[in-house]
Amino acid sequence: MAGQGLQAAGPTKRRISDRISDWLPGHKAGVEILLFSILMTVTSCIHYFVTLLMWTQPGFALDDSWIHLQFARTIYEGHPWEYSPGVPSTGSTSPLWSILLSSLLLFTNDPERLVLGTYVIATVLYCLCTFLVGLVVRSYTGHTVWGFLAMAAFVLFPRNTWLMLSGMETPLFVFMLMLSIYLLDKTEVKYDPLLGVVAGLAYLSRPEGILVCLVCFPMRFLIVTIRRQLTLRRVASFLLAGALALLVVVPWVMYCLSTTGYPLPDTFYAKVHVPNVSEIEAWDFWWSVWLLEFPFITIGVVSGIYLAIKGKPYTWLLGLSLLLLYRFSNPYGALINNARYLVPVFDLLVITAVAGFACLFQRLFTARIRPGTEALVQVAAVFIVIDLVLVPLLPEYFIQAQLFGNAVKNINEQQVQIGIWLRDNTPEDAVFAIHDAGALRFFSGRSVIDLAGLVTPAIVHGNMTVIETLSYLKNHGCDYFVFFDEIFFYWYWLPGAYDKIYTVHLEDNFISGRDTMSVFRVNWSKTSFS
């Protein structure tokens, strides 16, 4: 009987191996792209992580990353989106990212392990982003080598690994953008409903994801119409895609409306505004620097026009749409914190540069190539892209690895350290008025009032004067300010009524808003506030 069992198992194993053998030839390029994406991305992540350990212990390169983990903790504890106890907030820029991170709390509450778990999730999403980059560029060019070059440029863009491992929602947001592009390029009707769901998830990854619906959906409709593929069934399919996208985002929009009366998260109302002259000047200065430093920007903008003409406009279109959105709504905010908001713009333009150059090169020179020189010309084209796109990225890529370690060290030594000190040296019912809302809340476990308005609805929507704000703080039992010394202007209204009780000063500050942050205790009995 045992022999019969072995004989029965043999053909089954052979059939599985035969299926793999039959499947591989038709998917060889996809497997190669997957393996290269994992190798390239994981190698870069290990490089940055090892560099980080030379500076400090694991942590986040931005204080805002702790905001996402704090929201994740409230989700796990069963009172979602209450940043401080009993105070509902719509301050999560990426509710989907916080939901994803909340799964980590099923396994651990230890902050360092939560950081490591966040790294793992981010790295997996980063690998998927790189994989989709390779697939998209190969589909545009018809050659795997261009996919490899695009993936290399994507990972080597100096700020990319920095931000992907920062604890922010970037890997999730870029993954949703790339998945949207991958589906948008497939014009068959069967992809419309799935695209609607992904577009909704892109919005929940970051509000800017709405551009997939506002910009890419109309372009998809236009392309289908030009190709004479538009039918009543296709119109119904587009409507279904829109309905599914709406269905995905409605719960979050309804929550925002019920909490604040506004449909968008409070981060939008706290940050978006009409730019002033100094913000525009800062924007113009940095883009003049980047245009000289990174030739791929110009190559991507120009060659993307040809991709659009070919019916492959989405990396170019989304990149430019995000660029214009930030320029006209929050140019200075897009520049700070190592230009974190602009990284998806750079990502999309570097993909467009490689794919657009390859397609344009093939269009202009293939017909003029003499027989027998095709391979030589292709090699020359590859080296041109390496020289113009990849090589300029390398110097700052290595610099950014050091800056990543420096940034994590800054946050660990300032915001995290003060948060732990507050936990150990203040009453459990203490309330803090703060400017940086992340690690201070996460580590102290105390209630906070965010004077920047990101996670405290009453501040961002209250339109209060300084006097009204101070009265609000007194009436809500707030006896502490945790602020950067340079911007603590409340001393003017609180003369002789406060003491500085703890200070942290950074000697090597790269990422924190100011070098010095202090804890101030207020004695309201010495003031006239009621």
Image (spheres, grey):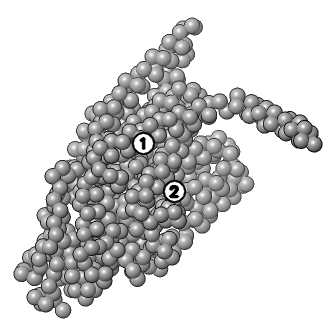
Q: Quadrant of residue 465?
A: bottom left
Image quadrant where one finds the C terminus = bottom left
Residue closer to the observer: 173 or 513: 513
Identity, as a three-letter code, of the amino acid under mark 2: Ala
Crowding at label 2, few (<14), some or many (≥20) Cα neighbours within 10 Å?
A: many
* Image-based side of 283 in relation to 98, left or right: left
State how many labels appear: 2
Residue that mark 2 sits on: 202
Residue 129 picture location, percent across and down? 51, 44
Where residue 413 sits, quadrant-wise, is: bottom left
At x 51% / y 43%, what residue is drawn? 127
Q: Is residue 349 visible?
A: no
For label 2, the SS is helix
Task: Tell which residue pokes out farthest to the bottom in this image.
Answer: 530
Relative horizontal placement of residue 359, taking residue 229 as reference (left or right): left
Q: Amino acid at mark 1?
A: Cys
Q: Residue at x 36, y 63 (%)?
A: 66
Q: Which mark is residue 53?
A: none
Q: First in sequence: mark 1 or mark 2?
A: 1
Which residue lies under the disc numbered 1?
A: 45
Front residue of 186 and 120: 120
- The spot of residue 111 in percent (x, y) is 39, 62
Q: Is residue 342 left or right of residue 189?
A: left
Side of 33 relative to 403 (left or right): right
Does the residue at mark 1 contact the one at mark 2 (Cβ under 8 Å)?
A: no
Q: Position of residue 481 (x, y in %)?
A: 20, 75
Q: Residue at x 11, y 87 (%)?
A: 527
Is residue 243 in sight in this rendering? yes
